[in-house]
């Protein structure tokens, strides 16, 4: 559980009500069609869920990390696609908070506070885990840069109001030749590809993002030339902890669904929840869920306190993602044939859970980050 102050409790109650009444059931049909539910997301943005992490000095709510975690978990419990849209919008502001100028931060904050979305464009067809292998180029032309390239699997790619774009300003320098830019929707040469037809989080928008002779002013550069890779790595160090919270939301929903089913499904003359085999499965699901929640919250609180958090964020993301898949499989097992049917919600939870082992760095990458952290250079 989360220990919330009064403001946190009030906000959580509001978000819970919204998710129960306007997200949970409604998302089922969008999960089938794969369409991004604009109406639901617009309502969530009106409530400020797309701008949860905008700092107070830029007009945001200035929420503490515990409240932020509780609100995101609630969203993910209702629909991990909604969680993905909202958290990605906030993620896109992080590189600016790390390395951007005041005017850039304020611009992105304003776009979010007006109900808009952001997109973080690092991944390319040949640069997923190997993120430094970007092929997109940014060539200086007078006071401008001309950007050419293609990004893929970009959350919010087709709906964003601003984009964080990485590109090579000097290919010879490897990771130290990568730079990051802030680009707004409508910039000539910027376009989004088709929506991905995904296995899960089907209510989130995922597209290619293409740059064809896209001209941006030098003022679009975030920080110094050549610092883009480190800025992105620092961004992901922060946001991976939150992915643990997203996975926790799925796990909590699995526990809730499995508990409810165990109490009403009768076999051999009694509810299946009376059998120790089911009770112990539920207990193990709960252990994993609460551990994932506390580890993810711990990593976020380290961030809040200004303490090192890179390893803890990776542990949170890795453990929670792996456990979300296991817990979703267990929920299906408890519901049996009904769990395998699309009429019940748990098969969607398994499809949604899988992404938490993949995005924001595969769990193999998290294990690299963790082992490097404990072993150092030798
Ligand atoms: N914070 C600050 N600096 C970092 C860093 C971090 N978390 N991670 C790496 N760096 C720095 C290194 O210190 C190094 O700088 P120096 O040469 O000055 O020492 C530089 O960046 C290159 O680092 P490294 O050699 O470790 O880079 P690699 O190419 O080996 O990549 C991994 C490291 C695998 C960790 C990185 O590519 C990664 O995280 N990949 C996954 C990407 C990802 O999460 N994609 C999801 C996209 S968003 S959905």
Image (cartoon, grey):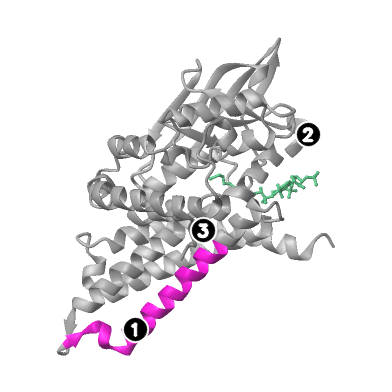
Residue 361 visible in the displayed image: no
Is label 1 in a helix, a strand or a loop? helix
- 10 shown above or below 155: below
What residue would you read off at disc 2?
173
Q: Nearer the viewer, residue 243 or 229?
A: 243
In the image, which is nearer the foreground, mark 2 or mark 1?
A: 1
Q: Earlier in the sequence, mark 3 or mark 2?
A: 2
Mark 3 close to ligand 1, CB under 8 Å: no
Give the residue drawn at x 62%, y 23%.
103
In percent of width and height, residue 353 lies at 41, 59
Q: In the figure, residue 169 lies in which quadrant?
A: top right
Q: Are marks 3 and 2 in contact (CB under 8 Å)?
A: no
What residue would you read off at disc 1?
279
What residue would you read off at disc 3?
244
- 119 shown above or below 339: above
How far apart marks 1 and 3 lie (CA) works out to 25 Å
Give the residue drawn at x 45%, y 59%.
247
How far apart marks 2 and 1 lie (CA) works out to 57 Å
In percent of width and height, residue 218 lies at 68, 17
- 161 shown above or below 253: above
Mark 2 close to ligand 1, CB under 8 Å: no
In the image, which is nearer the foreground, mark 3 or mark 2?
A: 3
For the record, the magenta segment spans 270-296
Q: Nearer the viewer, residue 225 or 13?
A: 13
Q: Main secondary structure of the magenta part?
A: helix
For label 2, count other residues whose C-alpha is less than 10 Å away and answer few (under 14), some (14-19) or many (20+): few
- 267 shown above or below 370: below
Q: Earlier in the sequence, mark 1 or mark 3?
A: 3
Is label 3 in a helix, a strand or a loop? helix
Answer left or right for 214 relative to 157. right
């Amino acid at each position: 559980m989360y220990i919330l102050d009064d403001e946190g409790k009030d906000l959580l109650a509001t978000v819970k009500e919204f998710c129960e009444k306007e997200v949970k059931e409604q998302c089922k049909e969008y999960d089938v069609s794969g369409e991004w539910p604009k109406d639901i997301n617009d309502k969530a943005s009106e409530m400020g869920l797309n701008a949860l992490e905008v700092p107070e000095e830029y007009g945001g709510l200035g929420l503490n990390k515990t409240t932020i975690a509780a609100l995101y978990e609630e969203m993910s419990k209702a629909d991990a696609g909604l969680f993905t849209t909202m958290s990605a919008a906030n993620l896109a502001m992080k590189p600016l908070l790390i390395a951007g100028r005041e005017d850039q931060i304020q611009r992105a904050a304003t776009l979010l506070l007006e109900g808009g979305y952001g997109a973080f464009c690092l991944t390319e067809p040949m640069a997923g885990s190997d993120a430094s292998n970007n092929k997109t180029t940014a060539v200086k032309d007078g006071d401008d840069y001309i950007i050419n390239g293609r990004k893929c699997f970009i959350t919010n790619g087709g709906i964003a109001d601003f984009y964080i774009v990485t590109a090579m300003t000097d290919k010879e320098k490897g990771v130290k030749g990568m730079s990051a830019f802030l680009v707004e929707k409508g910039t000539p040469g910027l376009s989004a590809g088709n929506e991905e037809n995904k296995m899960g989080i089907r209510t989130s928008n995922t597209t290619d993002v293409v740059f064809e002779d896209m001209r941006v002013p030098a003022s679009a550069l975030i920080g110094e030339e050549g610092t883009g890779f480190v800025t992105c790595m620092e961004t992901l160090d922060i946001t991976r902890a939150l992915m643990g919270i997203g996975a926790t939301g799925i796990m909590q929903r699995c526990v809730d669904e499995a508990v409810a089913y165990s109490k009403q499904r009768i076999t051999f003359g009694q509810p299946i929840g009376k059998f120790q085999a089911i009770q112990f499965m539920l207990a193990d699901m709960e252990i994993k869920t609460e551990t994932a929640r506390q580890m993810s919250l711990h990593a976020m609180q380290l961030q809040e306190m200004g303490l090192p958090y890179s390893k803890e964020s990776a542990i949170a993301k890795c453990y929670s993602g792996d456990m979300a898949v296991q817990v979703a499989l267990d929920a299906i097992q408890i519901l049996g044939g009904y769990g395998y049917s699309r009429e019940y919600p748990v098969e969607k939870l398994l499809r949604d859970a899988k992404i938490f082992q993949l995005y924001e760095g595969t769990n193999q990458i998290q294990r690299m980050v963790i082992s490097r952290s404990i072993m150092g250079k030798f």
